[in-house]
Amino acid sequence: MFRRITLGLLIGLIFAGLLFSQANDTPSGREVMENVYYRPTGDEMTADLKMVLTNSRGATRERSIKQFSKSTDDVDKKMMFFLDPADVRDSSFMNWSYHDGRSDDQWIYLPAIRKIRRISADSKNDSFMGSDFTYDDLGERHPDEDKHKIIGEEEYNGEPCYIVESVPVGSGDTFSKTVSWIIKDKWIGLKREYYDENGQVYKILQIDDYEKIDNYWVITDMIIRDLGRNHSTRIRMENVRFNIGLRDNQFSERQMMQGPRL
Amino acid sequence: MSNAKMKIYARLMLIAVLVLVVQTTLIAKDIRFSGMLRSYAGGRISEGDIPLTEQTLDLELQGWGNSTRININPYAYIMGEGDIDWGVREAYIDILFRNFDFRIGKQAVVWGEAEGVFITDIVSPQDLRSFILADFREIRIGVPAIRANYYRGPLTYEVVWLPIFVPTSQPGPESIWYRESMASIADSELPEKKLSNSEVFGKIKYFSRTITAEIMAGYAWDDLPVLEGTVNSPDPFHERFTVVGGSFSTTLSSIILRSEQAVYLNRAFTTMPSPGMFGTSDHHQLHSLTGLDWSLLGIDMSAQYILQYINDYEDSLLTSEYEHTATFRLRDSYFADTLTLELFGYVGIDPADMLLRPSLTYSIEDGVEIKTGIELFFGDEERNFGRYDKNSLAYVSLRWYF
């Protein structure tokens, strides 16, 4: 009798231990998205971006952008300078994303009127320069802005992924939820589906290439497709360089107007 | 020296500056040449004529050195009958340091938060030869100036010195924008070109995540002349005044709040103390704007209210004691921003008049766009917009950026 009880306790302990370790190994949805948000991306970075817009007839338009970014303990700052085509040349965009979850601050410089304008919160869902990205997509979405839940795990493009459903906490977003495929251990989002109010996917962001540059994982090729309009925008990142000595005060109105020559 | 000789010397000086800048450009590290070609035709709705046909070439040459930059912006307007108006809108050199920079040369200075209204933005005079319908870029006249900026944390300190006064350009008698009343202010007497007659402006700007704010002051010449003499023999001349003001923009929830205020101290105004006689009288004037920008259902919207008030008003003044104006803008884009619909309007209040500017812009391909629209004037004939009610236009323009 005693031996049977002891055996039962042992089996129980083993199962409990297995369950416990399983619970410890599988992060929560929030932890996954925090790992993505806080994935090291270098304190400073510069890159050349090629943005290709493709419409439903297959016609393409191309934009060249120079991007600079810098991270500090409490804020990530980003500046984008439009180099081509000629009608948007010298326009620039600046985004400040805060680690404490405050909403991003954004500004745009319009050379036609030589003025810098703040972008209102409601405008952050507008298209960024005719692309399928919104101004909000260009910032860093803080994990606090959504409730996250792991809804599955699967291999996607040969990588083991968590599938995380994220539902916005506040109002004002154009989507009712997103579902993201996050590579385990690398914490790179490979794919994200955007759902409308009716629970239908209307936009898909897909990462087609990423590589390790100077010990940082960098997404170098991504495409976002608007399924309703049958329109897509691909961004390829080239000439990525880290730690080039950017100063915090270079992320300023002065620089937005002066252009990308630092 | 005769006017003809002055013009020849001015053109020779311009060519010399051009040669100098081109020479500097050639030794600059990095050179960029860009520009815009525009073809424009506008016809009056009520008259059925097409008084506005214009080809515009606007070039920009930029060169960068290690800590310098040059910019030269020549332009040419070729009018319908072949008349050519050409010149250099800007030609300046920037000297850039870590915390300060200088801009020396002919330049347009843009200040403030207002859109389509000039309150603290009075450093550069305006080109009103096409009334206020020209692009914002083309409505400012570049003026010879030295500008210095010093950057310290979130603050920018700016000083602009303009050695020579340049007045606002008015339409000539051949223009559909010309009014008989403009004859009296044509060929106004300009201040003598000497150091004591130069203009100076200063500004301190604060930029942070929550607010952009600036305070400014200036000692300037009024771009618009005042009159003395008689109605039959007016004597237009420019007077000095001091301006103090400021502006800010900030975010209120999902709305951008903008404000711009200025007080013009002891500004001279034209009076008519007795029939047929002009005179002047100095008064403080308040020029104030409050504006909101927001987005609703994907449509960008903007509204501004502008007040002008003359202190210690007297009945002989030819300018109203109060001027209330509102502006609004609605803009929406379709097909990945290739098609843009816009409605911009100025509304004068009491007595009412209005300028409505609906337009449609289509981007045929990158850098090539066609724009069509209507400029609708109506309202009280004594008011700024109502007096042009016969000039309501329909237009089309084609632009090619390179």
Image (tube, rainbow, N blue to C red):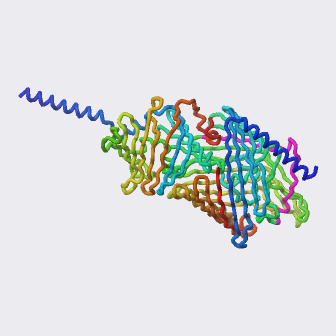
Q: Residue furthest left?
A: A1
x, y (%) of residue B51?
74, 67
Horizontal and vertical percent position of residue A261: 63, 37
**A148 lies left or right of B344:** left
Q: Does the magenta stretch include residue B196?
A: yes
Q: In which quarter of the image is residue B101?
A: top right
Q: Where is residue B50, by image quadrant?
A: bottom right
Q: Position of residue B266 (x, y in %)?
A: 80, 51
Q: Can residue B352 be seen in this view?
A: no
**What residue range appears in magenta?**
B180-207
Closer to us: A219 or B378? A219
Residue at the image point whose x is 32% and y is 42% from the top: A150
Q: In this view, does B389 lie to the left or right of B303?
A: right
Residue B185 is drawn in which quadrant? bottom right
| Image-based side of B297 in relation to B245, left or right | left
Residue B210 is covered by the magenta coloring: no
Percent position of residue B261, x then y:
69, 50
